[in-house]
Image: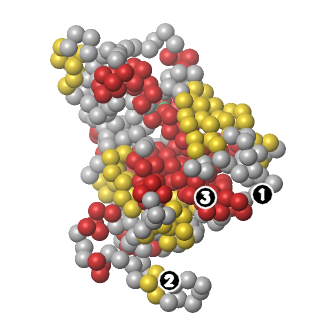
């Protein structure tokens, strides 16, 4: 692994820390841009009060000198603005929330109070991933690679978008969908679907319920040859899907046609190879989603992921009080109703980190902007 990162910290603790190691020296970076990335993740329609409390102030305390990476580990601290409000007011979590890490974590680590599990399992940690992802994006940009995301579905409401075949193949469509998504409070490029999604979120909120959804994340400009067919863990599709699946709440990840590829005959799944005029043969479709045999094939990398509804329900499901084993409603506290738009931005970061790692494996020695 050429580029790796670790995070530490709890949702309501003093802050989240990340160390990103493997960034080459000399990559130009800006705190302004980094703050903008954090802002893109922080708020989408359906997030709770916490998103307005957090300013995602960021401190970069290592690995940068005069606006460029130095080649040393990049160290990042994102203080939790909500931490001071939490001191002395933290409540125990005795009734694990179905769908949350609460119960399995409490049993595994020997707690009756699930609070320590809940705090670390919180998606607050993804702020640090987005910060690390920013650096990966900057590296990829030097190689002409850009990352985009948008939301296609929230609960039962689906966006009307160009056909999947087209959005996987055409870079201009990818870019325009992402541009439109940037203007939507739920990160959905379809304005009609956006309004319906927002109403649905309002209804879910009123009912004390939560909503999941589907987002797509893609990378353009990816050269042929990232990843490898030679071992399962070097395959780019293995790495991309694991990275996206690691986002809290993600339950399914597809590349290209994904599950649909199992339903159609081969003649409608595989992308024909045509002579073209350039140095390598060309394609006129991209149902593979830019990866064949575990190797990037030069087309748009196209990933789709499904996020389950958030497990903290204000009208809670049934649970058990772990301190006395009596039946009771699951723990409820302030939370988000829907965070699919934020998860899409986190997926951009995870895709960027994965591609940057694979890119450095292939081209690393050629990078030095210093
Ligand atoms: C989260 C619950 C909510 C989210 C939080 C993740 O926080 P709180 O319980 O303080 O209202 O807003 O996400 C963030 C703070 C963030 O920045 O993403 C959870 O339980 O996972």
What is the C-alpha distance between the residues marked 1 and 3? 17 Å
Q: Nearer the viewer, mark 3 or mark 2?
A: 3
- Residue 5 picture location, percent across and down: 58, 41
The answer to whether residue 162 is above or below residue 158 is below
Q: Nearer the viewer, residue 91 or 94?
A: 94
Give the residue displayed 42% in from the left and 74% down from the top.
286
Nearest to N terminus: mark 3 or mark 2: 2
Q: Is residue 99 left or right of residue 301?
A: left
Spot the residue most to the left: 327
Q: Is mark 1 within 8 Å of ligand 1?
A: no
Check mark 3 vs ligand 1: CB closer than 8 Å? yes or no.
no
Which residue corresponds to the image point at 40% horizontal and 70% vertical from the top-left?
A: 288
The answer to whether 245 appears left or right of 358 in the picture is left
Q: Which quarter of the figure has residue 16?
A: top right
Q: What is the CA distance from the residue labelled 3 to the residue labelled 2?
A: 25 Å
Q: Can you give x and y, in whole percent of width and height, for residue 300 in the image?
A: 49, 68
Query: Residue 110, located in which quarter of the rendered image?
Result: top left
> In the picture provided, is 304 more to the left or to the right than 262?
right
Query: Which residue position holds label 2?
Result: 282
Q: Which residue is mark 3?
A: 361
Q: Secondary structure at mark 1?
A: loop
Q: Which residue is mark 1?
A: 369
Q: Is residue 112 visible?
A: yes
Q: Residue at x 66, y 54 (%)?
A: 138
At a point 68% along the width and 40% down the height, the residue shown is 74
Q: Secondary structure at mark 3?
A: helix
Mark 3 and mark 2 residues within 8 Å of each other at the beta carbon: no
Query: Front-most of 313 and 186?
Result: 313
Decide which of 254, 295 is in the foreground and name it: 295
Is 92 located above or below residue 302 in the figure? above
> Is the residue marked by circle 2 packed among few (<14), some (14-19), or many (20+) residues within 10 Å?
some
């Amino acid at each position: 692994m050429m580029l790796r990162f670790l995070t530490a910290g709890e949702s309501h603790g003093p802050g989240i820390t990340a160390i990103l190691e493997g960034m080459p020296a000399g990559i130009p970076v800006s705190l302004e841009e980094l703050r903008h990335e954090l802002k893109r993740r922080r708020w989408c329609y359906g997030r709770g009060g916490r998103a307005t409390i957090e300013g995602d102030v960021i401190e970069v305390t290592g690995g940068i000198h005069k606006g460029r990476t130095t080649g040393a580990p990049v160290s990042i601290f994102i203080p939790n603005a909500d931490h001071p409000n939490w001191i002395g007011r933290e409540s125990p979590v005795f009734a694990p929330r179905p769908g949350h890490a609460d119960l399995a974590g409490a049993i595994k680590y020997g707690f009756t109070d699930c609070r320590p599990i809940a705090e670390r399992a919180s998606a607050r940690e993804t702020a640090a991933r987005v910060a690390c992802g920013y650096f990966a994006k900057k590296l990829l940009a030097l190689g002409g690679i850009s990352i985009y995301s948008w939301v296609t579905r929230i609960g039962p409401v689906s966006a009307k978008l160009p056909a999947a075949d087209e959005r996987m193949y055409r870079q201009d469509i990818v870019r325009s969908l992402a541009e439109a998504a940037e203007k939507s409070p739920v990160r959905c490029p379809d304005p009609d679907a956006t309004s319906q999604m927002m109403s649905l979120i309002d209804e879910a909120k009123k009912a004390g319920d939560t909503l999941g959804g589907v987002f797509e994340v893609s990378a353009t400009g990816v050269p042929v040859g990232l990843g490898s067919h030679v071992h399962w863990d070097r395959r780019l599709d293995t790495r991309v899907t694991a990275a996206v699946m690691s986002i809290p709440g993600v339950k399914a990840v597809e590349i290209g046609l994904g599950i649909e590829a199992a339903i159609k005959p081969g003649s409608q799944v595989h992308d024909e190879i045509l002579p073209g005029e350039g140095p390598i043969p060309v394609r006129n479709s991209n149902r593979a989603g830019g990866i064949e045999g575990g190797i990037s094939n030069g087309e748009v990398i196209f990933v789709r992921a499904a996020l389950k509804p958030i497990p903290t329900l204000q009208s809670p499901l049934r649970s058990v009080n772990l301190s006395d084993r009596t039946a009771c409603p699951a723990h409820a506290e302030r939370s988000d109703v829907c965070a699919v738009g934020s998860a899409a931005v986190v997926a951009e970061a995870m895709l960027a980190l994965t591609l940057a790692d694979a890119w450095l494996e292939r081209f690393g020695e050629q990078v030095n902007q210093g």
